[in-house]
Image (cartoon, rainbow, N blue to C red):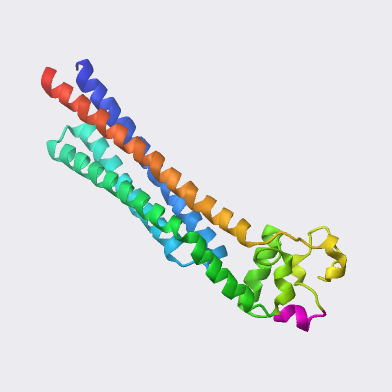
Amino acid sequence: MGFGPCASKCCLISFGLIYWAASGFLGYVAYKLYHEYQQYKEFLDPTYMELPASLLIIIAVAMFFIGGTGLMVAIEKSKYAWRCFVFLSFIIVLTWITGLSVGIHYKNKLNPHLERNMNELFQKYDGESAQSSTVDSIQERLQCCGLKNYTYWENSTWHIQHNNSVPHSCCKNNATTCTGSLDHLEQINTRGCESDLERDVHKLLGNVMYIILGFGAVEVSSLHITILLRILEDIYY
């Protein structure tokens, strides 16, 4: 076997195994994304998390089949399998492009959507409802208080009905005697939740987009290398 066929076979086997590994990794990322969505589902439209997660699952399944097809081409030298490999690779590249376009589109609309839903959620706070539990969870996890800052609660019904205090979830972790009273401001987190939450969601979606971009670059590069080696093999052998 000459260098050309040997190099082509080695590349196909390597790319096939890489695609299988990438498929498993993307499936894991999709699972983590869906899991993270559970923390934000009260104020984040499912489209912002479930759509990217679904897209990652589709891409993961497609990459699994592409990897298998690449190994089949390397082992059996089937022209039909080769055509399927190239066709599926082009389809997956188009899917990457679509995923990035969708991600950029929704990322630009994220802040107004978050601000509107968070405002509605905080306004409904009564300390007992499911929405209130979500607010408490956010304030405790991010160590924040109110939307813009702690003064948000001064104009709320909760503040008036509870002796001019803020929810207990505004208390700092190490403030064991904190009751939420504004008379002891040093025991309360004064930073608002809105900017921190927007930062976290943007970071999460941004990481997904970087992953899509990275794997897309690998896919395009591997496709070019494989086609080039195949052409050289046909010319010289």
Q: Main secondary structure of the magenta part?
A: helix
Q: Nearer the viewer, residue 182 or 36?
A: 182
Q: Is residue 182 left or right of residue 116?
A: right
Left or right, residue 125 beside residue 174: left
Residue 125 showing in the rendered view: yes
Question: Which residue sits furthest bottom?
Answer: 161
Residue 160 screen position, x and y as percent = 77, 81
The N terminus: image quadrant:
top left
At x 71% / y 76%, what residue is drawn?
155
Q: Where 221 sits versus 232, above or below?
A: below
| Image quadrant in which you'd find residue 117 | bottom right
Residue 42 appears in the picture as rendered: no
Q: Is residue 58 left or right of residue 152?
A: left
The residue under the point 11% across, 20% down is 235
Q: Is residue 214 above or below residue 109?
A: above
* Residue that appears at 68% across and 80% down: 126
> Where, quadrant-wise, is the C terminus in this rendering?
top left
Q: Which residues are magenta?
A: 157-163
Residue 162 on the magenta span: yes
In the rendered image, residue 48, in percent from the top left (x then y), is placed at: 44, 61
Camera-nearest residue between 53 and 47: 47
Magenta residue check for 182: no
Q: Position of residue 154 (x, y in %)?
A: 74, 74
Residue occupying the point 17% across, 32% down:
77
Q: Nearer the viewer, residue 161 or 27?
A: 161
The image position of residue 61, as x and y in percent, is 33, 51
Q: Nearer the viewer, residue 97 or 51?
A: 97
